Image (cartoon, rainbow, N blue to C red):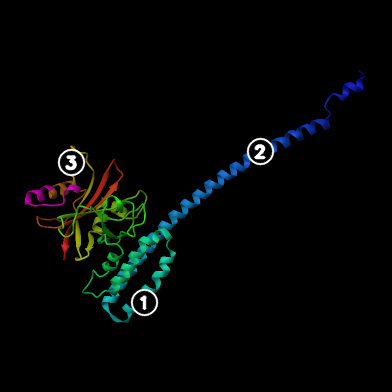
């Protein structure tokens, strides 16, 4: 074999380039597939982030619209009762703007908002001597309705239902549609015809949310209570105003465990049973509200979950002051 034949067996510069090109061509499909997978993952993550952001923005906008509607409703009611063209003009404005406001709400939230807007309209149209007329159209929509709870300036402004089949209203709204915020309710064993001495209304407190009974968290602070000392609860037959007596931060106790169970104290057939209830709520209160009560008073307690410990509860206890 001569020198020319030996040199033909060695890869030349051109041969090396050709080999590298073949390797690159073989690697490109795998590299492209990997890059596409990474892009797809990034796209999905961005999509989930946008959905979460959109839901959060929707909830915030809904809360703002509800508060704006509440304010307009109260102003309109005062103007209407005052009479004159100003009241009539404002009523027309509210009626005309209600469909536009409803159209701005997310579809899933309209079921809860629509009864509220309708109730506001009915309240304006009701004669002053019939202040509870706004509840009648709502009762026609859902016969589980027992009343309306409101704490001015907090966002608490909702219908209250009777828990016909526990725990239905923990996961359903007033329109009987599935809704994680539920609806404030009284327990199914309670009857307003034979009203208990202490009526307890339960509602959700979702983490990082101002919906339902979330604003009750504010009552941990005495200054908040001084700014919002009054609760209003109207039933189908009677309006009612209540003043906060005590604010309890407690929990649900296990069977056999010692502790004051405010949620079991609904009737006071004698002075001793009332004294047990009253002494415990005053001693267990986070602060002195300055409001006293006596045997024979009627009470309203708003109860919700807190997450300081397992089965934590926050209870705002108020006594009836009018009518």
The residues colored magenta run: 263-276
Q: Is residue 251 left or right of residue 95?
A: left
Mark 2 burial class by Cα count in 10 Å: few <14, some 14-19, many 20+: few
Numbered circle sitting on residue 259:
3
Report the residue at 29% width, 46% height from top.
306
How many labels, in total? 3
Q: Quadrant of residue 28?
A: top right
Numbered circle sitting on residue 323:
none
Q: CA distance from mark 1 to mark 2?
A: 66 Å
The percent position of residue 199, horizontal first and vertical second, equals 19, 55
Numbered circle sitting on residue 31:
2
The percent position of residue 82, horizontal first and vertical second, equals 26, 77
Going from N to C along the chain, the mark reached first, 3 or 2, is 2
- SS type, badge 2: helix
Q: CA distance from mark 3 to mark 2?
A: 65 Å
- Compared with residue 61, is residue 259 higher up or lower down, i.e. above or below? above
- Residue at image mark 1: 92
Q: CA distance from mark 3 to mark 1?
A: 54 Å
Q: Quadrant of residue 95?
A: bottom left
- Compared with residue 172, is residue 35 higher up or lower down, i.e. above or below? above
Q: Quadrant of the N terminus?
A: top right
- Mark 3–mark 1 CB contact (< 8 Å): no
- Compared with residue 120, is residue 35 higher up or lower down, i.e. above or below? above
Going from N to C along the chain, the mark reached first, 1 or 2, is 2
């Amino acid at each position: 074999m001569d020198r020319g034949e030996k040199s033909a067996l060695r890869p030349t510069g051109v041969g090396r380039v050709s080999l590298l090109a073949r390797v690159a061509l073989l690697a490109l499909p795998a590299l492209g597939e990997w890059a596409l997978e990474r892009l797809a993952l990034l796209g999905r993550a961005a999509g989930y982030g946008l959905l979460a952001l959109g839901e959060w923005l929707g909830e915030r906008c809904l809360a703002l619209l509800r508060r704006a509607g509440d304010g307009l409703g109260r102003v309109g009611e005062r103007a209407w009762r005052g009479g004159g063209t100003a009241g009539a003009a404002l009523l027309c404005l509210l009626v005309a703007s209600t469909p536009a406001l409803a159209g701005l709400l997310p579809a899933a939230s309209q079921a809860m908002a629509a009864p509220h807007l309708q109730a506001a309209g009915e309240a304006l149209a009701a004669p002053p001597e019939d202040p509870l007329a706004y509840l009648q159209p709502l009762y026609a929509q859902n016969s589980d309705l027992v009343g309306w709870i409101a704490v001015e300036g907090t966002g608490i402004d909702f219908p209250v239902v009777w828990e016909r089949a526990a725990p239905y209203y923990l996961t359903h709204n007033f329109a009987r549609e599935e809704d994680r915020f539920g609806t404030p309710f009284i327990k199914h064993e309670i009857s307003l015809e034979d009203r208990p001495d202490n009526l307890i209304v339960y509602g959700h407190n979702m983490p990082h949310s101002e919906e339902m009974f979330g604003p009750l968290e504010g009552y941990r602070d005495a200054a908040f209570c001084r700014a919002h000392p009054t609760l209003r609860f109207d039933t189908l037959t009677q309006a009612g105003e209540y003043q906060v007596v005590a604010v309890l931060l407690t929990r649900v106790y296990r069977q056999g465990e010692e502790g004051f169970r405010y949620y079991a104290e609904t009737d006071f057939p004698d002075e001793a049973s009332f004294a047990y209830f009253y002494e415990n709520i005053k001693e267990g209160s986070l602060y002195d509200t300055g409001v006293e009560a006596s045997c024979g008073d009627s009470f309203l307690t708003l109860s919700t979950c807190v997450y300081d410990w397992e089965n934590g509860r926050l209870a705002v206890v108020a006594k009836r002051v009018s009518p």
